[in-house]
């Protein structure tokens, strides 16, 4: 069985270096769209601004309850929507359509900044009905993307969590996290923090086109090393594993992470849901024309003839020979390098509301 809805590729006059997506896919929620009918320029046409735009907003809420049973988290918060890192495979791209933008280039260069995120979190944790459970920071987009260097919202969220002794899990692929080393170390001493660093490839040529505005794998390993030496529990996220592109690197990534102090792991298998299917297909054939057909068909073989599977428990693991091989290697090398051996959990018993109920109105 094969996927009969393989998208037609849109050819652009030049490759947009420094961006993952090369096109803006249509927003499924919008009735109208802007198109260029005549390449000769007969129509009025305004090209999208090529630079990243930070769009500041006052959000109404910051903590979201996670309903998906196979995510491994119950609550998440994201100070930014959209992500300048530009990872072509990112599942969060589809969420940008709810904001009226495209999952393609818009996702990378129209970044929503929730300027009141720390205040919203303080109000949320101060509510008497909150029963402390771990909250994930970066359940959607990377909280240490370039915008953080200017806005420091993630730092603000961590300061609130530290004041309340609210435990958090974090995931990032940006070594900018080291700016908050002091705070992370303090929270780690109270067993309030656990961090996954995402490493998809040790091949810099692949990283440069697949995750164009992220830091290098070497810098991510340095992040694991420095924070683990500071007493922070560090792990590595391997994924998504993409057959024909990076799945053969699983062992090398896991060993490198273990050598630098990582003690636990997680992984996902590539799935191309929603607009990501069109974006990835376009990107794949532009960057790897020599093996694009092979990679695409291997992904199809791992999702029952499609490139996406929405079934809980299967969608992020895949099935079939390639997906099974990745799962077997993940287990084998995890055991070999002593990963996931400890029984460990974030401490919810220390939670407190500083300043009493008055904090609810801060």
Image: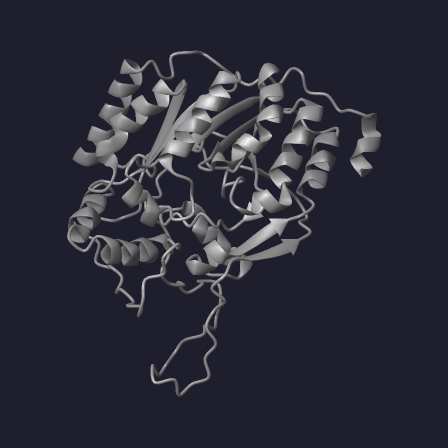
Query: Residue 113: image x %, image y %?
Result: 61, 50
Left or right relative to 207: residue 184: right
Farthest bottom residue in view: 42
Looking at this view, is 57 or 210 the one in front? 210
Residue located 43% across and 59% down the image = 105
Residue 41 position (above or below residue 298) = below
Query: Residue 97: image x %, image y %?
Result: 49, 58
Residue located 45% across and 12% down the image = 343
Query: Residue 6: image x %, image y %?
Result: 24, 59
Task: Please state, as top left, top right, bottom left or bottom right, where the C terminus lies in the image.
Answer: top right
Looking at this view, is 12 or 360 the one in front? 12
Looking at this view, is 104 or 212 the one in front? 212
Residue 299 appears in which quarter of the rendering?
Answer: top left
Residue 268 appears in which quarter of the rendering?
Answer: top left
Left or right relative to 226: residue 132: right
Q: State whether residue 117 appears in this view.
A: yes
Residue located 74% across and 36% down the image = 123
Farthest right residue in view: 358
């Amino acid at each position: 069985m094969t996927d009969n809805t393989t998208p037609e590729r849109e050819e652009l006059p030049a490759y947009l270096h420094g961006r993952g997506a090369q096109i803006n896919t249509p927003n499924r929620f919008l009735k109208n769209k802007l198109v260029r009918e005549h390449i000769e320029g007969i129509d009025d046409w305004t090209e999208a601004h090529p630079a990243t735009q930070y769009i500041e907003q006052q959000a109404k809420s910051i903590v979201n309850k996670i309903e998906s049973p196979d995510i491994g988290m119950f609550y998440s918060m994201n100070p930014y929507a959209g992500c300048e890192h530009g990872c072509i495979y990112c599942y969060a791209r589809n969420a940008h359509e709810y904001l009226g933008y495209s999952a393609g280039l818009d996702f990378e260069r129209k970044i929503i900044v929730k300027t009141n995120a720390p205040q919203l979190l303080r109000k949320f944790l101060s509510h008497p009905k909150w029963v402390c459970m771990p909250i994930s920071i970066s359940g959607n987009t990377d909280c240490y993307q370039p915008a953080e260097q200017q806005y420091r919202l993630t730092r603000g969220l961590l300061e609130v969590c530290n004041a309340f002794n609210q435990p958090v899990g974090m995931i990032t692929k940006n070594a900018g996290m080291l700016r908050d080393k002091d705070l992370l170390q303090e929270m780690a001493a109270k067993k309030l923090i656990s961090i996954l660093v995402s490493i998809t490839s040790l091949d810099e040529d692949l990283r440069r086109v697949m995750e164009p505005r992220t830091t290098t794998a070497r810098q991510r390993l340095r992040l694991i090393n420095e924070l683990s030496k500071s007493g922070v529990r560090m792990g590595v996220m391997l994924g998504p594993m993409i057959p024909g592109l990076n799945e053969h690197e699983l062992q090398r990534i896991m060993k490198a992470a273990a050598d630098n102090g990582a003690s636990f792991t997680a992984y996902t298998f590539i799935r191309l849901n929603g607009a990501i299917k069109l974006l990835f297909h376009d990107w794949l054939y532009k960057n790897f024309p020599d093996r694009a057909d092979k990679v695409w068909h291997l992904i199809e073989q791992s999702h029952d003839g499609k490139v996406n599977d929405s079934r809980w428990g299967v969608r992020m693991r895949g099935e079939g020979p390639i997906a099974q091989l990745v799962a077997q290697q993940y287990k084998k090398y995890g055991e070999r390098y002593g990963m996931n051996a400890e029984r460990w959990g974030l401490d919810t018993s220390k939670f407190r509301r500083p300043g009493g109920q008055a904090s609810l109105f801060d």
